[in-house]
Amino acid sequence: MSPITRTRRRVLAVAAALAASVALAGCSIPSADGGDGGTERIGALYLDSQGFYGGVKKGVQDAADADSKNVDFLESTSAGDVSKESSFMNTLTSSAVSAIILSAVSTDGSVPAVRQASEAGIPVICYNTCVSDDAVDQYVTAWVLGDPLKFGGDLGKQAAAYFTEAGITAPRMGVINCEQYEVCQQRYKGFSEALTAALPGTVFVANQEGAEVDTAVSTAEQMLSANPDLDGLYGEAGGATVGAYKAVQTRGLVGQVAVFGSDMTSDIAAELADGSVLKAVVDISGIEAGKLAFAAAQDAIDGKTPDEKVVAAPIDLYLPADAAGWTETHPDGLP
């Protein structure tokens, strides 16, 4: 039997959560402990369906395909909406799934749903974003995380090297952020500390939200218009990165404003390969994070307690010369 046959996938849209809850009351749904031919049911929630989160989904499912167990995924996308996340988490908890893998929408707002699952005896595995530290200690089994301070710090060091080579000793920076998530706050901290440590004259002129591409483009354009002397923009996430380099191009500032970005995608890799605006990108592979999250879920299901709650995800820095290699090894465009 092929791995694909072994792994049965069922994607439950958030809009169908109520219907799923009703179905769970019947006897046709297999039990989470393998009541239907040894099948495990694992819940998985993604903040988005593309980019990093598309990579996580692929990593989770690739790991399941390689596993000897039958796995039935119940999946949904929260789209950054706490109420959607809560509704689907309730469905997963009511169905007594074997484990839940999620990137939490809110440090505090996601706590009730995570607590409910944990108190029902369901292991909760976070990846990327999670709940508050106290809640992690009490209700989360493992957290797959690329150290956000190092993530930002590695890029900040590269930005310093770029400006030093360009003869800019006191760069003026703008930031397009995703700081509604604590992980992005830590990314900024790492980036700013590394850049200012190398170039103490650095000034961060503006820092505004722009996690989604459409918002990021308009925010970056306004930032560039209000601050015509900017030397660089830092995008804390993928959407922010795309918005930053598109704004530089739209404003006719190619060669004047450098962009330093986060989270590789095929579009970002193509822009990095060009190298005229985007100078470096730091990335955590969603595929690798997904594989680590699935492994942590399996360990929890098997009753194994992790030595450390935080499972380190690898962090990679890409320069223009590296972009073609990334594209070659990611033909489907998933990071």
Image (cartoon, grey):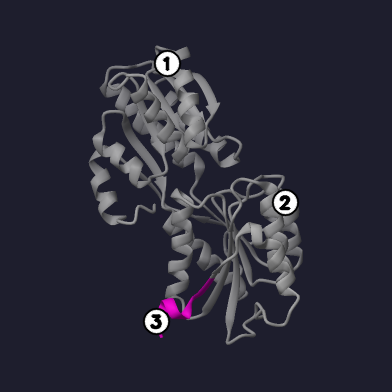
* 55 shown above or below 24: above
> What residue range appears in magenta?
1-9
Residue 111's disc is 2
> How many discs mark residues in the rendered view?
3
Q: Secondary structure at mark 2?
A: helix
Cα gap from disc 2 to disc 1, whole angstroms: 41 Å
N-term-proximal mark, 3 vs 1: 3
Q: Residue beneath label 3, please? A: 2
Within the magenta stretch, is there residue 8? yes
Q: Residues within 10 Å of mark 2 (few under 14, many from 20)?
A: many
Q: Tell me the amino acid under the disc marked 2.
A: Val
Q: Where does residue 318 sit, x and y in percent of width and height?
A: 32, 42
Q: Residue beneath label 1, please? A: 201
Q: Is residue 296 left or right of residue 235?
A: right
Residue at the image point whose x is 75% and y is 67% from the top:
120
N-term-proximal mark, 3 vs 2: 3
Q: Where does residue 261 sit, x and y in percent of width and height?
A: 40, 35
Query: Closest to the observer: 102 or 171?
Result: 102
Q: Tell me the amino acid under the disc marked 1.
A: Gly
Q: Is residue 74 left or right of residue 218?
A: right
Residue 271's disc is none
* Tags 3 and 2 touching, CB below 8 Å: no
Cα gap from disc 3 to disc 1, whole angstroms: 59 Å
